[in-house]
């Protein structure tokens, strides 16, 4: 839904429309010190009550404690003067201050007391304001049912006095609650449609209620159009629809998004509507218009330096390019979106950004970066979870507040001593029952649910890490953030290379060529996995693996030779099958050598486990000096496996840059 109706933005608007007494004597004084000098020593009358309230509002941003102190003085003076309206406004104002500090229970306490007074003096405007604010708090805490209870109460009060602006606001807020759930989107649309003609009437008459600007009306209308558009857009995404129903709802969404763009024209808010419109274009695969809408939104957001809107525009641009198939442009925009979102800690956007980056890198087989962003995704989700959990914990007492509110209204007319005893009793009940049992239940539920979710995502991240690093090295990297290079005295290294690769690539489509390479490499992975051999890397049609690392063992020469024989057998069988189907085929050269190496993780970003040393170079020469269908091993490896395999001595063979080397073909297992 549009930001106007979510979280703080919505509350700010509601609090701004509360009835405020404006005194000429206060308005004419520009200096805060001068204002204090006039108000504080003045006569104790209703004017001073109102002036203290105004003073508290002026100092809140710079000194919240002083603001609460001045508002409390106003309340005390109003009680002394039996000025009920002033007392209610003062307590309402204190509630606002506590709300802005995140002290929701204190805010509810003061608002509830204010509501009791407003009810006793039949001030429906004040009652409607309080119900709106209470509903907004519950909405923020995720208690939609309780939020709408208050919104409907506020709506009834506003309708009694025909307060159009409050009616409009409450209808929109009720719609926003229904929009939270997929199965109540039709109800959301019903209430957004109820408020729309009231706003359009004010807009067409170029009028605003007393004490409000026409800009507020413009904002209301633009918000209403956006909310209606979003409902239409979401409806077919969340429920099964025919193609015709989807086209109809998309068309309606676009109509209202375009209306909001017209209303917001010249305002920074238009970037939000443009991004919404762009999402519809993306779904319709009209990527040209989608990219144009998001690009325009980005330009406007940059002009006013709105970091959140910049991040959103870049995120939606990236998604449009991603669906279009332009992965490079998608990657660039995701990375820019990440920078903008990090500046404002926009965690919900970061979740989508990290997911997009992880997906792109995974498809590129860039597993280090895919793993890095998968972990960033998990961290962002955990952060959101912790924020949501804080809100839930703060909201534990909110259900109790409804009963307390009713009791407090009744207690206003009772003896003060009885009232205090009742409140103490309620606090004991709340702290003893809700504070104990409910907290235990809540923590039990959220803990096990979150633990299971995090466990699944951690498993996915760990699997991704093990795709690129040996288990021992991966654990070291997770524990310390680094992986030290290590020397190994004896490691057996294998290289393979496809023969006929160039000829096959000329006869196969790119898709079929990659599919065939993948088929072969998957079988190679399976074979070496049986022998505990570590895959190092693939370079085009060349495959490299090694035994005896990262955990040394005594069987690695034998393991590599056995794996090599199985690989050649697989390639031969695969060749026969493809010849039978009249398809191009691969043949394989394979070389093995044993000796010392250094192994470790290289790179700061695209890190990879690799090995170095003369042993690696010699193993490569074993492959290039080998023969199709044969397992070619060096004299060094032969001495280590000669008791296990029948081998044919080839004599000394010239190897590039290595001179003559004893080489053997492995014939069979003994």
Image (cartoon, rainbow, N blue to C red):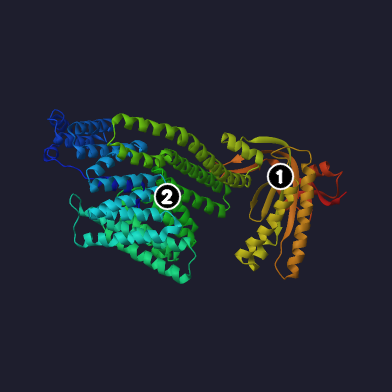
Percent of width and height locating residue 583: 70, 68
Q: In percent of the image, x 46 and y 37: which residue is there? A: 434
Secondary element under disc 2, as helix, strand or loop, is: helix
Of residue 476 and residue 535, the one placed in the foreground of this image is 476
The numbered mark, 1 or 2, whose residue comes first in the sequence reads 2
> In this orientation, does residue 622 appear?
no
Secondary element under disc 1, as helix, strand or loop, is: strand
The quarter holding residue 31 reads top left
Marks 1 and 2 in Cβ contact (< 8 Å):
no
Q: Is residue 178 depicted above or below 433 in this figure?
A: below
Q: Give the left or right position of residue 94, taking residue 585 as reference.
A: left
C-alpha distance separating marks 1 and 2: 40 Å
Q: Residues within 10 Å of mark 2 (few under 14, many from 20)?
A: many
In this figure, which residue is indicated by the disc labeled 1?
A: 546
**Of marks 1 and 2, the one in the foreground:** 2
In this figure, which residue is indicated by the disc labeled 2?
A: 337
Which numbered marker is on residue 446? none
Q: In percent of the image, x 36 and y 37: which residue is there? A: 105
> In this orientation, does residue 345 appear?
yes
Q: Residues within 10 Å of mark 1 (few under 14, many from 20)?
A: many
């Amino acid at each position: 839904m549009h930001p106007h109706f979510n979280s703080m933005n919505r509350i700010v608007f509601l609090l701004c429309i509360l009835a405020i007494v404006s005194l000429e004597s206060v308005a004419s004084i520009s200096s805060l010190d001068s204002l204090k000098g006039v108000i504080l020593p003045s006569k104790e009358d209703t004017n001073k009550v109102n002036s203290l309230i105004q003073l508290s509002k002026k100092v809140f941003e710079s000194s919240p404690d002083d603001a609460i102190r001045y508002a409390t003085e106003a309340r005390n003076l109003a009680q002394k003067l039996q000025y009920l309206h002033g007392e209610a406004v003062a307590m309402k104002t204190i509630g606002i201050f506590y709300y802005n500090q995140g002290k929701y229970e204190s805010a509810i306490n003061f608002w509830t007391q204010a509501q009791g007074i407003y009810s006793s003096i039949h001030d429906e405007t004040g009652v409607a304001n309080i119900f709106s604010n209470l509903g907004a708090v519950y909405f923020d805490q995720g208690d939609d049912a309780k939020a709408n209870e208050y919104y409907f109460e506020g709506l009834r009060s506003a309708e009694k006095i025909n307060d159009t602006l409050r009616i409009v606001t409450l209808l929109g807020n009720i719609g926003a609650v229904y929009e939270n759930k997929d199965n109540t989107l039709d109800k959301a649309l019903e209430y957004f449609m109820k408020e729309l003609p009231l706003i359009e009437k004010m807009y067409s008459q170029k009028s605003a209620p007393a004490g409000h600007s026409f800009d507020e009306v413009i904002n209301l209308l633009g918000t209403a159009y956006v909310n209606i558009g979003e409902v239409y857009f979401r409806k077919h995404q969340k429920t099964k629809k025919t193609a015709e129903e989807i086209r109809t709802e998309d068309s309606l969404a676009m109509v209202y998004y375009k209306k909001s763009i017209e209303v917001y024209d010249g305002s920074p808010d238009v970037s939000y509507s443009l991004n919404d419109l762009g999402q519809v274009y993306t779904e319709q695969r009209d990527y040209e218009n989608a990219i144009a809408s998001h690009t325009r939104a980005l330009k406007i957001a940059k002009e006013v330096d709105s970091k959140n809107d910049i991040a959103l525009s870049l995120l939606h641009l990236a998604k449009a390019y991603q669906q279009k198939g332009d992965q490079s442009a998608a990657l660039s925009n995701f990375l820019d979106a990440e920078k903008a979102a990090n500046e404002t800690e926009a965690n919900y956007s970061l979740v989508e950004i990290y997911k997009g980056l992880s997906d792109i890198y995974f498809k590129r087989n860039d597993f280090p970066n895919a793993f890095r962003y998968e972990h960033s995704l998990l961290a962002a989700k955990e952060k959101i979870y912790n924020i949501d959990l804080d809100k839930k914990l703060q909201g534990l007492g909110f259900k109790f507040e409804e009963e307390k509110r009713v009791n407090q209204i009744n207690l206003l007319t009772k003896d003060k001593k009885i009232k205090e005893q009742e409140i103490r009793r309620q606090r004991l009940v709340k702290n003893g029952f809700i504070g104990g049992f409910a907290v235990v239940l809540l923590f039990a539920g959220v803990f096990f649910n979150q633990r299971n979710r995090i466990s699944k995502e951690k498993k996915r991240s760990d699997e991704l890490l093990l795709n690129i690093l040996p288990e021992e090295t991966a654990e070291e990297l997770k524990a310390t953030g680094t992986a030290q290079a290590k020397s190994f005295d004896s490691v057996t290294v294998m290289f393979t290379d496809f023969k006929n690769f160039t000829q096959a690539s000329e006869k196969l489509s790119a898709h079929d060529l990659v599919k065939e390479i993948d088929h072969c490499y998957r079988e190679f992975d399976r074979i070496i996995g049986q022998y505990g051999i570590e895959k190092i890397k693939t370079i085009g049609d060349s495959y490299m693996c090694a035994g005896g690392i990262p955990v040394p063992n005594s069987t690695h020469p034998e393991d590599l030779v056995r794996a090599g024989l199985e690989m050649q057998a697989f390639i031969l069988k695969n060749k026969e099958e493809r010849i039978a189907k009249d398809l191009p085929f691969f043949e394989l050269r394979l070389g093995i050598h044993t000796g010392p190496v250094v192994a470790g993780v290289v790179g700061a970003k695209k890190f990879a486990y690799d090995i170095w040393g003369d042993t690696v170079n010699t193993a490569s020469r074993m492959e290039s000096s080998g023969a199709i269908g044969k397992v070619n091993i060096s004299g060094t490896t032969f001495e280590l496996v000669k008791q296990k395999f029948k081998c044919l001595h080839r004599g000394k063979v010239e190897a590039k840059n290595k001179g003559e080397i004893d080489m053997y073909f492995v014939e069979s297992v003994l």
